[in-house]
Image (cartoon, helix red, strand yellow):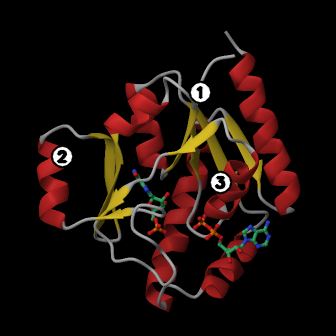
Amino acid sequence: MRNVLIVISGPSGVGKGTLVKLLLEEDPTLALSVSCTTRPPRKGERNGRDYYFIEKEEFLSRIRENDFLEYDEHFGNYYGTPRSFVERQLKEKSVVLEIDVVGALNAKRIMPQAVLVMIAPPSDEALEKRLARRGSESEEEREERLRRMRYELEQQKYYDYVVVNDDLQEAKRRLQEIINREKKKT
Ligand code: ADP
Ligand code: 5GP
């Protein structure tokens, strides 16, 4: 079985973090790539677990040193995937990236073997509710995230798989199925 690079994307609030956490708890052959970001931590987030929270100057200097496999800017903050971690881990495990659509398409260009999975909400309304319940953004920020959601969902056509996150357990099973199928490909 081969090690695969699984790239999970989807609009903010769709349940990517929740699903990835469940996957990793159940499958020791998966490693999560922890991204770097210049945004401040949310309540409950931990440096090194959820993100590496770094200053903008450090981020810009790491871009110059080609330290990121891909990076992007959202809502005024930078986010990037550390290249060395992904390349090192892939020798031993399958690696999960949880990144946005632009980043996913860039990652696929650089590593064409990457498997792109889009997590989609059952409906626009369901996503609005989830974002509001999480409560970590202002109304204005939520509006911007919803606008971005429409754009991101349009990019489904470039993806290898789309998983609708309606029932959480069902979405998790579908993701596990996809990963196992991809591992068996030669
Ligand atoms: P993301 O990582 O995509 O931004 P989160 O994993 O933070 O999204 O999920 C956003 C909110 O939606 C959280 O409060 C989470 O508990 C909830 N959620 C996730 N999946 C489901 C689901 N299938 N049904 C209902 N609520 C969900
Ligand atoms: P949040 O601030 O909600 O954690 O993330 C905002 C957006 O940044 C999400 O769409 C998330 O998937 C994306 N993101 C997180 N890490 C990375 C990364 O390393 N690269 C890119 N391109 N996007 C990322």
- Position of residue 43 in the picture relative to residue 127 (left or right): left
Q: Quadrant of the C terminus?
A: top right
Q: Position of residue 185 (x, y in %)?
A: 71, 14
Q: Which of marks 3 and 2 is in front?
A: 3
Q: How far apart are marks 3 and 2 (CA)?
A: 26 Å
The type of residue carrying mark 2 is Ile
The type of residue carrying mark 3 is Val
**N-terminal label among 1 and 2:** 1
- Residue on which the image places disc 1: 4
- Residue on which the image places disc 2: 63
The label shown at residue 107 is none
Q: Position of residue 87 (x, y in %)?
A: 40, 29
- Residue on which the image places disc 3: 20
Q: Is mark 1 on a helix, strand or loop?
A: loop
The residue located at (45%, 87%) in the rendering is 140
**N-terminal label among 3 and 2:** 3
Q: Is mark 3 within 8 Å of ligand 1?
A: yes
Q: Quadrant of residue 38?
A: bottom left
- Position of residue 140 in the picture relative to residue 182 (left or right): left
Q: How crowded is mark 3: few (under 14 residues within 10 Å), some or many (20 or more)?
A: some
Q: Where is residue 160 in the image (x, y as percent from the top left)?
A: 65, 32
Q: What element carries label 3?
A: helix
Q: How crowded is mark 2: few (under 14 residues within 10 Å), some or many (20 or more)?
A: some
The residue located at (19%, 37%) in the rendering is 66
Q: Work out whether 14 lies above or below 138.
A: above
Q: Is mark 2 on a helix, strand or loop?
A: helix
The residue located at (63%, 39%) in the rendering is 30
Between 167 and 139, the one lying in front of the other is: 167
Number of numbered labels in the structure image: 3
